[in-house]
Image: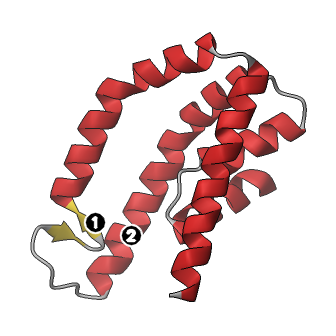
Amino acid sequence: MGAGAGIGIASAIFGIGGGSLTVPYLTHYGVVMQKAVGTSAACGLPIAIAGALGFMLFGMKAEVNVPNTIGYIHIYAFLGISIMSFFTAKFGAKAAHALSPAVLKKCFAVLLVCVGCFFLVKGFL
């Protein structure tokens, strides 16, 4: 429960998917990479819902005056990303099962390095 709470809070603070933290956590405890990715994807929905509701509620209290938003959530961006994610998730799942666990770990490591570099660059600008 502590890991779940920590992952959920960190995901919301940094604006990254919970999978960026859930997959390394699960693989650290011996879960096979493909199963860690699948489990992380299933965990991503409640993390995203809780985070989105929080950003909506706190944003409504802050009285954000940006068109097409509910709190801090931009409706058109939400719809576009959600719809495309729904249709492309099956391709990601097929790719994850087509790759060996070692290659999948390396691809995931590259993704995490890119995300980390993005935060470092944004922090210094």
Residue 108 x %, y %: 66, 39
Q: Amino acid at mark 2?
A: Phe
Residue 101 x %, y %: 76, 21
Q: Which mark is residue 73?
A: 1
* Side of 10 where 41 appears, left or right: left
Q: Which mark is residue 91?
A: none
Q: Nearer the viewer, residue 34 or 74?
A: 34
Q: Amino acid at mark 1?
A: Ile
Secondary structure type for disc 1: strand
Q: Quadrant of residue 96?
A: top right
* Side of 19 where 4 appears, left or right: right
Q: Nearer the viewer, residue 64 or 116?
A: 116
- Type of colouring: secondary structure
Task: Bin the neighbour count of mark 2 within 10 Å (Cα to Cα): few under 14, some 14-19, many 20 and up.
Answer: some
Q: Nearer the viewer, residue 17 or 106?
A: 106
Q: Quadrant of residue 41?
A: top right
Q: How many marks?
A: 2
Would residue 105 be visible to someone looking at this image?
yes
Q: For the point 65% across and 51% down, which residue is it?
A: 112
Task: Bin the neighbour count of mark 1 within 10 Å (Cα to Cα): few under 14, some 14-19, many 20 and up.
Answer: many
Q: Nearer the viewer, residue 31 or 6?
A: 31
Would residue 1 be visible to someone looking at this image?
no
As measured in the structure, the alpha-carbon distance from the residue carrying label 2 to the one carrying label 1 is: 7 Å
* Residues at discs 2 and 1 in contact (Cβ within 8 Å): yes
Residue 59 x %, y %: 32, 78
Q: Which mark is residue 55?
A: 2
